[in-house]
Image (cartoon, rainbow, N blue to C red):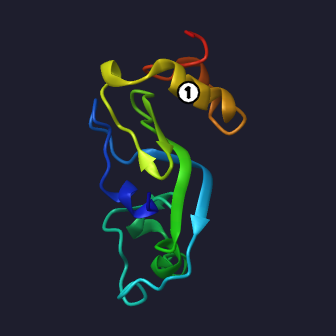
Amino acid sequence: MKYRLMDILACPICKTFPLKLIVFKESTHEKEMKGAKSKICCEEYCSLNNGYVSKVPLEKLICSECLKKEIVEGIIICPECLRWFPIQDGIPSMLPDGLREKEKEVSILWKYKEAIPEEVLKNGKPFNLMNF
């Protein structure tokens, strides 16, 4: 998953934007992205810099470097409803609660519990470590 995707994602349940991204594992490739040096790619929110594009200093908006990065594992968190969505093998899974696999997803919370905010571990939806 590219960081740039966070510029268009909103919580599928409560529609909150922007969402919080926590990256556990990323990869980098050296292929140059056409046109990335000459323009800012994200329109509203730069997740690599954790801020709105209008508030991030221009020297930090290095889109050509950002586009070389791929998020391999991580989670996306809605700061409003505390729903969290896993990113596995570079693919974000933002399914409705009823279609999610509890055991598989809770294993992600256990595996990365040191990097996940305590609020999500205790109160995250649809699953957390307190209700498992």
Q: Quadrant of the C terminus?
A: top right
Query: Does residue 23 appear to the left or right of 56 in the view shown?
Result: right
Give the labeled residue for mark 1. 120
Name the residue at 61% across, 17% down.
129
Residue 109: quadrant of the picture: top right
Q: Identity of the amino acid at label 1? A: Val
Residue projecting furthest to the top: 131
Give percent across and percent down for residue 100. Answer: 38, 24
Residue 128 visible in the displayed image: yes
Give percent across and percent down for residue 95. Answer: 32, 32
Query: Does residue 115 appear to the left or right of 14 in the view shown?
Result: right
Residue 127 visible in the displayed image: no
- Above or below, 92 against 13 in this view is below
Residue 27: quadrant of the picture: bottom right
Name the residue at 53% across, 19% down.
103
Q: Nearer the viewer, residue 11 or 101?
A: 101
Helix, strand or loop for disc 1: helix
Query: Does residue 65 appear to the left or right of 38 in the view shown?
Result: right
- Above or below, 112 against 102 in this view is below
Query: Does residue 132 appear to the left or right of 12 in the view shown?
Result: right
Name the residue at 62% across, 53% down.
25
- Above or below, 92 against 65 in this view is above
Residue 33: quadrant of the picture: bottom left
